[in-house]
Image (cartoon, helix red, strand yellow):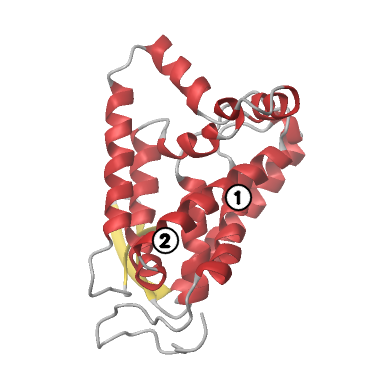
Amino acid sequence: MIPIAGSVRSLRPPIVTITLIMVNVFVFLQETHLAPQALEALIHRYGLTPAAFTAALAETPGRIDLWLIPFFTSMFLHGGWGHLIGNMLFLYVFGDGVENRLGHGRFLLFYLLSGAGAASMQIAMASSSAVPMVGASGAIAGVLGAYLVLYPTARITVLVPILFLPLFFDIPAAFFLLFWFGQQLIAGSLGIVAHGVEGMGGVAWWAHVGGFTSGIFWLGLLLDRRHLGHRPARYDARAYHPHGY
């Protein structure tokens, strides 16, 4: 299932969400102009490699450029067009509603903290892995976790390709997001069974799990429950509770 649109719409433009998408696209376009060796050096320098992180933190904790900075720079690097487009589509669909409730500044802080939480989970699960981790999916997973808490009964329009036929369905946000989270848990667990903790490569499933749970955690701390967000008069989430989140 590919999310296409959500029913939650703000009266104010999601400035931070749009800016994050633009920055990610800009950085990736710069990546495409690099020679293969230069791109590999960039990924190893600004991506987050669990083994390099743990070594730098233990041996040279004062060199934050070796362990802290990659926590955040890795969120803006991507491994290919499919990786970028998939992440930006999820951010576009779900970012608006979360930014709507948190406000611009808090949403940016929330996004970065969720990404850091995602990276922390991946490091905890594979601390000696030498595979660099790049991509915005951990931070975006935090957005999905927050959306689940804020708008469980909102409607998500999804595309389900059946052979060559694109079929569109409207489903509850809670169903889509819990299904997505379950996929990450299952895939991450199967990866451990098949390859062991340190042999995991490819998709950072546990970063997704960590980002999703971090998003729920940080939402509870950053959300101003007196602020209902800037939403249109016709909001079709049927079980909206003004004093909850």
Residue 162 visible from this viewpoint? no
Q: Nearer the viewer, mark 1 or mark 2?
A: 2
Which residue carries the number 2 mark? 107
- Mark 1 lies on a secondary structure that is helix
- Asked if residue 84 lies left or right of residue 61, the reply is left
Provide residue 86's location: percent of width, then percent of height: 38, 46
- Asked if residue 187 lies left or right of residue 39, the reply is right
- Asked if residue 200 lies left or right of residue 225, the reply is right
What is the C-alpha distance between the residues marked 1 and 2?
A: 15 Å
Q: Earlier in the sequence, mark 1 or mark 2?
A: 2
- Which residue shows up at 23% across the image and 65% down it? 13
Residue 169 visible from this viewpoint? yes
- Identify the image quadrant of residue 62: top right
Q: Is residue 138 placed above or below 31 in the rendered structure?
A: below
Q: Is residue 33 placed above or below 238 in the rendered structure?
A: above
Answer whether labels 1 and 2 touch (C-beta < 8 Å).
no
Provide residue 3's location: percent of width, then percent of height: 37, 60
Provide residue 192's location: percent of width, then percent of height: 73, 40
Provide residue 221's location: percent of width, then percent of height: 57, 68
Which residue carries the number 1 mark? 117
- Mark 2 lies on a secondary structure that is helix
- Which residue shows up at 37% across the image and 75% down it? 155
* Amino acid type at image mark 2: Phe
- Identify the image quadrant of residue 127: top right
- Which residue shows up at 51% across the image and 55% down it? 141
Q: Is residue 130 placed above or below 133 in the rendered structure?
A: above
- Which residue shows up at 37% across the image and 67% down it? 103
Which numbered tag is attached to residue 168? none
* Amino acid type at image mark 1: Gly
